[in-house]
Image (tube, rainbow, N blue to C red):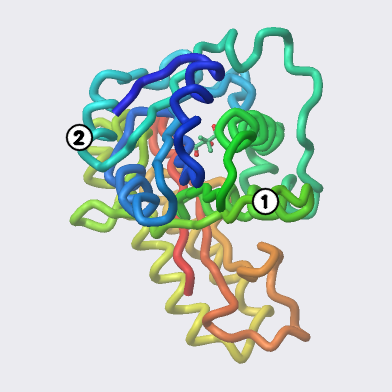
Amino acid sequence: MKLVHTTEELRAAMRPYNSPAFVPTMGNLHDGHLNLVRSAKPLGDLVVSSIFVNRLQFAPHEDFDSYPRTLKADCDRLEQAGCDIVFAPLEKELYPVPQLFKVHPPGEIGDILEGHFRPGFFIGVCTVVMKLFQCVFSEAKGPRYALFGKKDYQQQMVIKRMVQQYAMPITVIAGETQRAADGLALSSRNGYLSEPERAEAVQLSLTLRTLAREALATAEAMPQQLNALESRAMHALATRGWQPDYITVRRRADLLAPQAADAVTPESLVVLGAARLGNTRLIDNFEV
Ligand code: PAF
């Protein structure tokens, strides 16, 4: 496996190959990332992963400075998972001048849920992903694949739409969320949790599972009863000491609330949640 830090080195290393499968990350890797790398392996003729903590997607009060930088351990894990090239650019490589051109996802998908609670987040994500795609794919000759985890459900949807609307010749694949034995979704931010917080953290996924079950049971009565179920789930978490941003049932197609006119089926819904436990903000979701 090769570790490169500049776009020039990346392109030189990729030259003999035709069809890259790309797994962008911010490092501090867990099995969710490694599973994406393993899924990428059979897709093309080389697997590229990037490690870049992207300042643009963090608000000033968020954890950009403290986000764990673990390059050596990440490279060891990527190599074991079958990655061929790791692209770990310095900030001045991706942002040599202030990044004034930015990709603004449309409000319908970019300003709801995560976009509402983290204003500017998807602008930062789309802008860096667009740049990373330019670095990784610009000289590819065969099919191009990019893999994102479903734990960031809205993110993978936003990126799929960006790729579609900019007519980028890239197939975006969403990998299933990997979970710890108790059901907690794997996340780089789980490392921030204290021992008691880690024991409590599974309640987010349990709450979402319960809501998914309840939503199914009341599918006929949707959407009238959903608001009440969502409020009850938020309240249940709040009484355990969480600060929920949202716990909600949405349509998979567009992440909007199901409407009375919709033919609601379990396959058409996703339950999503974001909540803070102490200083750590966790997100999770289940396709119903
Ligand atoms: O999901 C992440 O790790 C990041 O948002 C991404 C897609 C690598 C962009 O910085």
Q: Earlier in the sequence, mark 1 or mark 2?
A: 1
Q: Residue at x 43, y 36 (%)?
A: 48
The image quadrant of residue 73 is: top left
Q: Left or right of 52: which side holds 220? A: right
For the residue pair 286 and 106, the one nearer the viewer reads as 106
| Count of number-bearing discs | 2
**Gap in Å between the C-alphas at discs 1 and 2?**
45 Å
Q: Position of residue 231 (x, y in %)?
A: 56, 62
The residue singled out by tag 1 in the image is: 169
Seen as rendered, the residue at the extreme bottom is 220
The image quadrant of residue 121 is: top right
For the residue pair 216 and 163, the one nearer the viewer reads as 163
Q: Residue at x 20, y 34 (%)?
A: 195
Q: Quadrant of the N terminus?
A: top left
Q: Residue at x 59, y 8 (%)?
A: 92
As displayed, is residue 243 above or below residue 53?
below
Q: What element does badge 1 sit on?
A: loop
Q: Position of residue 39 (x, y in %)?
A: 35, 54
For the residue pair 176 and 19, the one nearer the viewer reads as 19
The residue singled out by tag 2 in the image is: 195
As displayed, is residue 27 above or below residue 202?
above
What amino acid type is highlighted by mark number 2? Glu
Residue 24 disc label: none
Q: What element does badge 2 sit on?
A: helix
Q: Is residue 8 visible?
A: yes
Q: Residue at x 46, y 46 (%)?
A: 21
